[in-house]
Image (tube, grey):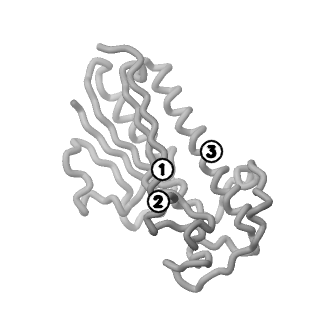
Amino acid sequence: YATGAFVGDPALSPVSGFGAGFQTYAAPKPDSDDPAEHEFEGVSTRFVNWLFEKSPSQDWFAYLHVDELVRLWGRRSADPRWDTYFPPRPELASIPPVADADGVFFAIPRSRWSGGTLTIGEYEARYDGALYALDAKLGQLLERLRRTGRLKNTTVIVTGTFGTSFGESGLYLSSGTLTDVDLRVPLFVRPPLTSS
């Protein structure tokens, strides 16, 4: 098998041992702020370029890691259409306090605060919109693999590493309490459509 890993989070640097076992390991440099290295498009482009260098008969394994949803809170030039794609739930109409630090309960961590006075429902709608946009990007990548004949014999696994809390267990826009928000993450497995 040819093996490759393509990640968008500089914390997953090969220096920290995350590249072990991969023939190709592509991660942003720790000091890089280039969106092309971090965002889904950059990660998927590096993967597609790597894959299409291989013969169609070559067996391969690839790992893609994107952190679009983690970076959602720190972005400054967002595509606003996704922020309002879903309406906020009325039961989440309260405006949470903002803390001066991270790792807090019953307040939004300062690093995830967007400024202004958004309700919890508006934050949730923004997150859901970003998730919807990420799903569409993943669909485009899979469609590209399908059109080129690379998808039919490929197993695709999509999972999350953790969720984001919108008030559950006292956390806002955060995780780390090992509650359902952290533990109940998606796992989708799509087996190959044909066998070799």
Q: Quadrant of the C terminus?
A: top left
Q: Which residue appears at 50% of the width and 51% of the height? A: 39
N-terminal label among 3 and 1: 3
The one nearer the camera, 94 or 143, is 94
Answer with the quarter of the image where residue 17 lies.
Answer: bottom left
Tell me if 133 is positioned left or right of 63 in this view: right
Q: Quadrant of the N terminus?
A: top left
Q: Nearer the viewer, mark 3 or mark 2?
A: 2
Tell me if 59 is positioned left or right of 131 in this view: left
Q: Which residue is mark 3?
A: 133
Answer with the quarter of the image where residue 110 lies.
Answer: bottom right
Q: Which residue appears at 24% of the width and 52% of the height? A: 19
Q: Secondary structure at mark 1?
A: loop
Q: Which residue is mark 1?
A: 185
The one nearer the camera, 79 or 151, is 151
Q: CA distance from mark 2 to mark 1?
A: 7 Å
Q: CA distance from mark 3 to mark 1?
A: 18 Å
- Please say if the residues under marks 2 and 1 sit with CB atoms less than 8 Å apart: yes
Q: Which residue is mark 2?
A: 182
Q: Secondary structure at mark 2?
A: helix
